[in-house]
Amino acid sequence: MVPAHSRDHPLADESADFSLFLGGPLHQLWRRTRLSGNALEMLHRRVFWIVLFAWAPLLLLSITEGQAWGRSVDMPFLRDIETHVRLLVALPLLVAAELIVHRRMRLVTSQFLEHGLIPDAARPQFDEAVTSAMRLRNSVAAEVLLIAIVYTAGLLFTWRAQLELGVSSWHGVTSEARFRPSLAGWWLDFVSLPLFQFLLLRWYFRLFIWARFLWHVSRIDLKLVPTHPDRCAGLGFLSLVRVTFAPFLLAQGALLAGMIADRILYGGANLLDFEVELIGIVAVMVFVVLGPLLAFSIQLDAAARAGKREYGALAQRYVREFDQKWVRGEPPDESLLGNKDIQSLADIGHSFVVVEEMRWAPFTWHTVLQLAITTLLPVLPLTLTMFSATDLINRVLKVFF
């Protein structure tokens, strides 16, 4: 429940309704074309029309040119795993993840207020951080810049990647070191891929806004409690981002898996050849999701040191009086020993242990492992290119038996 002073503040509603995706030119376009409501509803309709616009023309044009199946080219459309994974798996995941982040992120950010972490005097500073984030989210110039990047650097990267594959495919052939797109290839290069790349870059821009917001909040002198049972002085709720951003991580993993699959099937590569890429994608995704949370490390470290000092002094006083009363039989000052808020020596000992176990970041190594597994999950089926399903089962059984 939001404290009374928070409800009365003019920007309380905006702080509680913090959303990375409920705004901006694209969101307004979704609303005007009736592909979204005011709160990103109509997800199925949005996914259906985006996939239809990006993928269906490629199928129809490939059929028209006789390159959807058969042996007219080395890689016909229906056997291009990377394209299908990109447009039928990763693209819907990116769109669906927007709704998930929109709904969950408000629950995360509102807890700064609900848990009383923001001092009354710093409330305007917190509201300014929210306002600044929403202003950047709604920027028209930012999304126009993303489109410009997609149609410049994005196209150059796309054509270079198609040249590197070195086989004739449904989207074009390479002649004299020059890539010549087919009709389907033109649609892929100027419609389908730019649409996907724009949504992907827009996601990273939203993640930048989130990181920037956390940085501004971390500049506030938060009311942290060293004995909080989450071992993060009350900031443990921030680790919920591992669930919030899971669909985005799956989309990134699927994108890499599709690229690797095409190079294994048509380029003669092996899964182990992509060890650097696999490690790199995990490192980047873990940093993107958890890196912004490190902004609170300085305050957490300061709270831990202050807690150890203060609760250490309290424990010292308590055990000294306990020793005087029960061991030495001397009359102690009962103001501490007789206080009903301090039930036993075990209670104060537990409080001191909690302070000792405080973490310097609002997440654990278990969180890092979860993010890594989520990112690599789409790559798992590619292990069957190295050995059969029977071999895989036998290898797993040998681990346990």
Image (spheres, rainbow, N blue to C red):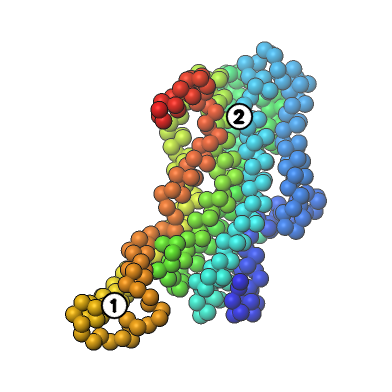
Instruction: Using a 10 Å C-alpha cutoff, classify the residue at mark 1 as few (fewer than 14 neighbours), some (14 to 19) or many (20 or more).
Output: some
Task: Tell me the quadrant of the picture where the C terminus can be found.
Answer: top left
Label 2 sits on what residue type?
Answer: Glu
Is the N terminus in the top left, top right, bottom left or bottom right quadrant?
A: bottom right
Foreground of the two, 132 or 379: 379
Who's the residue at 72% across and 20% down the image?
A: 68
Quadrant location of residue 53? Answer: top right
Q: Which residue is mark 1?
A: 318
Amino acid, disc 1: Tyr
Position of residue 294 measured from the top left corner of the image (x, y, whole percent): 43, 58
Locate residue 354, reporting x and y percent.
37, 64
Reply above or below: 318 against 192. Answer: below
Q: CA distance from mark 2 to mark 1?
A: 66 Å
Q: Which residue is mark 2?
A: 82
Of residues 255 and 43, the one nearer the viewer is 43
Please state the total of marks drawn on the protein image: 2
Q: Is residue 352 left or right of residue 23?
A: left
Q: Determine whether the residue tagged by mark 1 lies in a helix, strand or loop.
A: helix
The 10 Å Cα crowd at callout 2, few under 14, some 14 to 19, many 20 or more, is some
